[in-house]
Amino acid sequence: MDRLSASVQYVKGVGPKRASRLKKLGIVTIEDLLYYFPRTYEDRTKYSKIRDCADGEKVSLNVVIAGSPSILRPRRKLSILKVPVKDSTGAAYLVWFNQDYLADNFSEGEEISVNGKIKRNNFETQIISPVYEKRNKGNKVGSIVPIYSVTDKLSVNEMNIMIANALKEYIDEIEEIFPDDLLKSFNLISIKDAIKNIHFPQNRETFMAARRRLVFEELFILQLCLFIIKKKFGLKDDGISFDKDVNINEFTENLPFKLTKAQEKVFEEIQRDMESKRQMNRLIQGDVGSGKTVVALMAIYKAVKSGYQATMMAPTEILANQHYESVCKFFDGMGIKCELLTGSLSVKAKKRILDELQSDDIDVLIGTHAVIQDNVKFNKLGLVITDEQHRFGVKQRKLLSEKGLNPDTIVMTATPIPRTLALILYGDLDISIIDELPPGRKKVETYAVGVSYIKRVNEFIKKQVRGGRQAYIVCPLIEESEELNLKSVEELYEKFKNETFKEFSVGLLHGRMKSSEKDEIMENFKSHNIDILVSTTVIEVGVNIPNANIMVIYNAERFGLSQLHQLRGRVGRGEYQSYCILINESGSKISRERMKILQSTTNGFIISEKDLELRGPGEFLGLKQHGLPDLKIANLFTDMDILREVQKRVMEILTKDPELKDEKYKKIKERMKKMFKGKIDEIIFN
Ligand code: ADP
Ligand code: MG
């Protein structure tokens, strides 16, 4: 076993105690530590001088301790610690209140970096409650100092030292995965230099070279995996050509509304694919409420009228039910037989459906995961549709399409992602976008407020609910298993039910409930047995409850913008003016900016691009949502250029050696398996 997989506690300066703290950051092995990249860097050249500091300004300074600390006690319960410091331009005091114990930390002559707010009067300059760092050997090198994300029990400084130690001892263990010729032609520095310089760059150039190397490698591996998957699921040329003579107008004429231009355009794209011999594999992206379902029904209509069966899979019973209702309504009187297959069906009903499916008595099967079970056999399956596809894996999609003979497939999603990103994630799909909402939709009025507004928000909810409307109240759940957050949704619920909203019927929904319980709650909300639904984010994307017109989101700062946008999409689906109230509990500038974006636009694509832009490297949640590994360093927004180059290189390599059989790719293949943690390596390498 290689030394890098050993526990991080063996690194000098770590030990068991720090190791357990590092674990909270996801750092378990020595390798994890080496690959724990700085969140940002501090450019030491940007430090201010004491002379230039203005009153009220927040600054970073490099200073030297100029004497002994003094402690003043102007009154009971107040002590003031003052530490004299200086730099080449003047003198100042570091000042802390009621933190006498800090006094022992400083000795004259010591060099430290501080950051804090300046208080300046005619007599002296003070730096109030600064954060400080001793400039010891660990982080003095160069003018760029790494800043790591840490927990409250690990300081940036400690992290710095641990990483410096790990580098010293283990850097030679890091393996180069690229053979020499590739390194050269890609113009990359070696992995060892890259790791060293990403932590402690000497200057901007070495940092850039290190970052480029690491981003390149990360995207290269990701892209390689995705391209190979794409090939595995490669479109067959012996797909079905659906009947050109089916008259879609016979379906659309009966709709209670006129299709939007965007819906028409997307259906044309689908129709072209369906009529061609090539197998269709198309992603339909459209914001919530853009009317994807109808477009899907048009495709189903065409398939059925061409003599084939069609199926549509949704991630939950509620959604499946909702689709089934649409299908029944819109296909009424057209001689199309539809059935609904879900887990909660009786054995007898299920058997009948399975039989009729096989004998071709059923034209359209709507269902949940139940439709991909082995015993579900179609007679002549020609079209397969997956709704809210990010909830399903590649494998489930594959299982469903294997129930037919190269059936055409459509996947639909309401999670808008930037087109460029879509190309990476769905390299294997053609993309259609419904970029227009049906006319007459009222814009959801969006407000971002602080916690001090909660009372008023509650009054507003009461007023609306008394007027017959319904409300969603969402609070965050970062991990479904996180005790703390789960409790907070329950607490909120108890309080609302027993106090704030006791005159109304209040319901609770969260991820720990059984899916049958969840469905029951949603049904009760839909049928208006519940006025106010307190929930985590499990409220389904795509659920249509037009009477609900208020969405209140607690701790809105904790959600991604796209996620907030999705939640907002739960309201504004009916005739009533709707409201989305974001309770922002963070005072930070960036979170205010994020809230502003939501207030200023309802375009999901703009929001998702901003989301991508505002997140730091490696934090793009979208990937996880789509079943892909997190990126540690690449930023899909700012690293677009590298990505393009990577795509080109990967194509070149795969054209010559589609399965990477050449011995020189051995290490690259190992890395691919590692990146996907075995989840889909059975798909890639067998
Ligand atoms: P989503 O894209 O979020 O899945 P749906 O397909 O559920 O959206 O459509 C939302 C609502 O809009 C449905 O009630 C649907 O009947 C209605 N709808 C769809 N297309 C149109 C249209 N062109 N004009 C008016 N209403 C439409
Ligand atoms: Mg939908």
Image: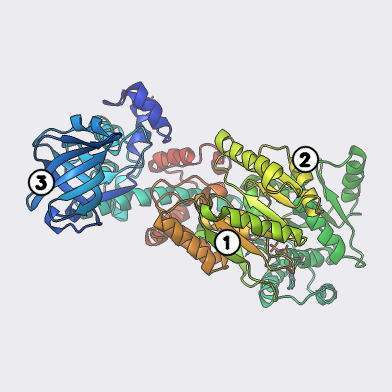
Residue sitting at x 17%, y 41%: 112
Q: Callout 1: helix, strand or loop? A: loop
Question: Counting residues from the N terminus, which is met first, the one under dot 1 or under dot 3?
Answer: 3
Residue sitting at x 18%, y 39%: 82
Q: Which mark is residue 86?
A: 3
Q: Which mark is residue 516?
A: 2
* Relative image position of residue 686 (x, y in whole percent): 57, 40
| Badge 2 residue CB within 8 Å of ligand 2 | no
Q: Residue furthest left?
A: 88
Question: Which kind of residue does numbered mark 1 sit on?
Answer: Pro
Number of residues whose C-alpha sits closer than 10 Å to that of mark 1, classed few (under 14), some (14–19) or many (20 or more): many
Is residue 422 visible in the rendered image? The answer is no
Question: Which kind of residue does numbered mark 3 sit on?
Answer: Lys
Q: Callout 2: helix, strand or loop? A: helix
Number of residues whose C-alpha sits closer than 10 Å to that of mark 2, classed few (under 14), some (14–19) or many (20 or more): some
Q: Which residue is mark 1?
A: 416
Looking at the rendered image, the disc whose residue lies closer to the viewer, 1 or 2, is 2
* Relative image position of residue 160 (x, y in whole percent): 26, 37
* Relative image position of residue 468 (x, y in whole percent): 78, 60
Marks 1 and 3, how far apart at CA: 53 Å
- Contact (Cβ within 8 Å) of mark 3 with mark 2: no
Residue sitting at x 91%, y 43%: 349
The image quadrant in which ligand 1 is located:
bottom right
